[in-house]
Amino acid sequence: FLKGKTALITGSTSGIGLAYAKALAAEGAAVMINGFGDADAIETERKALAETSGAKAAYSPADMSRPDEIAAMVKACEEQLGGPDILISNAGVQFVSPIEEFPIEKWDQIISINLSAAFHAIRAAVPGMKARKWGRIINTASAHSLTASPFKSAYVSAKHGLAGLTKTVALETATFGITANCISPGYVWTPLVEKQIPDTMKARNMTREQVMNDVLLAGQPTKQFVTAEQVASMALWLCSDGAASTTGTNISMDGGWTA
Ligand code: NAD
């Protein structure tokens, strides 16, 4: 149902972002992927996405901590694929540390990639969406946009900010056929989660198993990790006609964590 539409998904060489790209391509959307990783692996994914969609697929290496590169990415999408009609700001990084030891450069990096990058991308993409009178802005926030955990000061701050940005953009675009929403997953088993286990073990003086069961899944009543495919299925729904009145929301997919 997305034939003729173009989706730009940041941070889509891995995890949830790649699942979004696959789901949107399966509905026929042209997709631009973005993120870091092995060049050959990325090219293999890009080709597979084009085969799946029967439309074009492109890759942007833009660094989401660089406003100039973000603007250039949106322009490249417009030139190479058209759109973007669907913009998913998903790139995100994590760092876990007590606040008094939290490295200042890590704070700045997380705020720029997890929050400011969405501002820069939306700012560049909205004029085209307004002109075409259709747009879907989706931001991957987190359960941490609604609730906090210790040792994640930058991440929790950035995700709360992203939820506020989303609501503001929803109000500004409401009469243009554009919706803006957050999807807020609980713990999804991706490289981002796997990578924070060693630091959490150190910060809380715990074993790997204790971190998995007593920290990550402790607050998730289902006792299951959310899957990237489940998150992607929500993005598909937000792109559907049935979601045209759903704007400014923050949709939890967290196994009951924030209930
Ligand atoms: P991931 O580490 O698997 O993927 C992150 C992606 O972002 C990768 O493609 C990476 O290359 C890209 N990226 C990182 N820094 C970048 C930069 N400076 N410029 C461009 N791309 C960059 O992580 P994931 O778990 O799939 O996370 C995706 C999003 O989902 C993040 O915003 C994260 O905060 C959010 N989230 C994840 C979980 C979870 O449990 N995994 C839960 C809630 C929210």
Image (cartoon, rainbow, N blue to C red):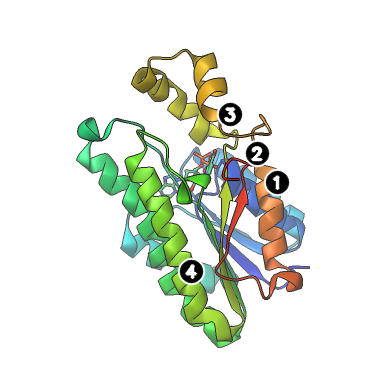
CA distance for labels 4 and 2: 24 Å
Q: Residues within 10 Å of mark 1 (few under 14, many from 20)?
A: some
Label number found at residue 217: 3
Q: Are marks 1 and 2 in contact (CB under 8 Å)?
A: yes
Cα distance, mark 3 to mark 4?
29 Å
The residue lying at 56 percent from left, 28 percent from top is: 218
Q: Earlier in the sequence, mark 4 or mark 1?
A: 4
Given the current orientation, which residue lies at the most extreme right position?
1
Q: Earlier in the sequence, mark 3 or mark 4?
A: 4
Above/below status of 15 relative to 163: above
Q: Which residue is mark 1?
A: 230
Q: Confirm if mark 4 falls within 8 A of ligand 1.
A: no
Determine which residue is flagged by label 2: 226
The residue beneath circle 4 is: 167
Give the residue at x 66% y 29%: 223
For mark 4, give the secondary structure: helix
